[in-house]
Image: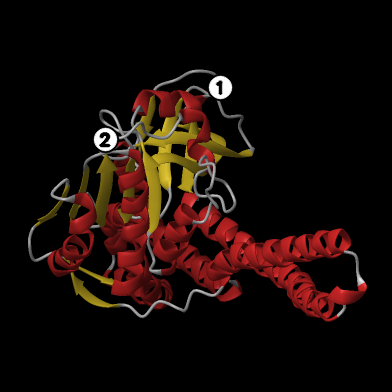
Amino acid sequence: MASERALKLGVAVGVAGLMALAIAADVLAPTPEPRRIVLCGLLALAPACLLWRCLHRLTPRMPHMESIAASAPETPRALADANLALDARLEHAPIALFRIEHASGAGAVAPLNASARRLLAPGRAIAPRELHQLLGAQAVGQRQLVSFNTERGAERALVAISALSVQGVAQRLAALMPVESQLEAEALNAWRELVQVLTHEIMNSLTPVASLSRTACGLLEEVQNDLQPDIHADLNTALDAIARRAASLADFVGSYRSLSTVPPAQPQRVLLEELFERLKALLEPQWQGRLTFSVEPASLEVMVDPGQLEQALINLLKNAAEAGTQAQVSARLSRGGRLRIEVADNGPGVPEALAAHIFTPFFSTKKQGRGIGLAMVRHLVHANGGTVRHARPVGAGARFILTF
């Protein structure tokens, strides 16, 4: 910094010296003499040399300025590239983003990325306008778990709203993350652990009761002659009832134990047309032509455990046989390239008030039901990386949709 100041001072001194000599030469111009002109020229050499040296030492700083000027035209291009990169990140964000007009209250809602548009596309949200109203009603700065209806049933999602201003216009940004699959997986794990603990403790108590009751029956036979006939008959009836109930409860609890002892899935590439042919051959005697299967296209395949998928479909069709006279099983690709298997019947369907509980273990609407069939279906489907929903039927009957 000090050297640059000295160079600028040298430039000023050189310019001042040349100006002084020019003035002196102008004063002496009326009486020109060769010796005086030569003298002025010699005297001008010193300030001219000083000026040249100072300017020469200042010139190396010019390329830096030129490089800055040269890079200036590239700034808009860099900004455009940054905007494109930001748009690409938002477009492929794994959560649905929506813009809501106004800082509060009702306002127009518009999707901002691909996840949001897929959520509003046919096949997902049944009533997009209701979903828009639901988003607009959320408070800014809070996270809320909301539920909205889709063709696959009710789905829950986590919503967060933030307020911002873009070019002086107040608006809100809504982030919607569907969490239905994650919540179902956690609930299923919790139920499985609970069933495992309950069945273990209950079986530990029932086993000695059943064993002791059988032992007591044997001892009673040994002392039969020492007891009055009516007392012997009463004791025999009581012990037999205890043994029967213990055995029945053990069988009942053992059926629930299957929820926590299902072996891990062994996925393999399965041609759905062949799997449906096996199911049709197995169930045809029961349905007698009232059960139909369809696959579009015929070459449709899926990576699942074939035995577990067959068992899940058999459980659904067993319920359909008890509820209706006809059933259809269809498989096709849905939006986004996911496999969609639909099982529908023409029975009375599932009451609206009970639809949220049908996959819960121990829950059943049948008098002799154990509440394990649909719980096992959900467990098997989740074990193979899929989801199962009870969907609103187009007409009568029940409709279940498996998605992989």
Q: Residues within 10 Å of mark 1 (few under 14, many from 20)?
A: some
Of the numbered discs 1 and 2, the one sitting upstream in the chain is: 1
Amino acid type indicated by mark 1: Ser
Q: Position of residue 180 (x, y in %)?
A: 48, 49
* Element at label 1: loop
Q: Quadrant of residue 277?
A: bottom left
- What residue is drawn where x is 42% and y is 24%? 130
* Quadrant of the image containing the C terminus: bottom left
Residue of label 2: 346
Res 374 visible = yes
Amino acid type indicated by mark 2: Asn
Q: Residues within 10 Å of mark 2 (few under 14, many from 20)?
A: some
Give the total of numbered labels.
2
Relative to 347, 95 lies left or right = right
* Quadrant of the image containing the N terminus: bottom right
The nearer-to-camera label among 1 and 2 is 2
Q: Which mark is residue 104?
A: 1
Relative to 176, say whether 43 is above or below.
below
Res 169 visible = no
Relative to 393, 329 lies left or right = left
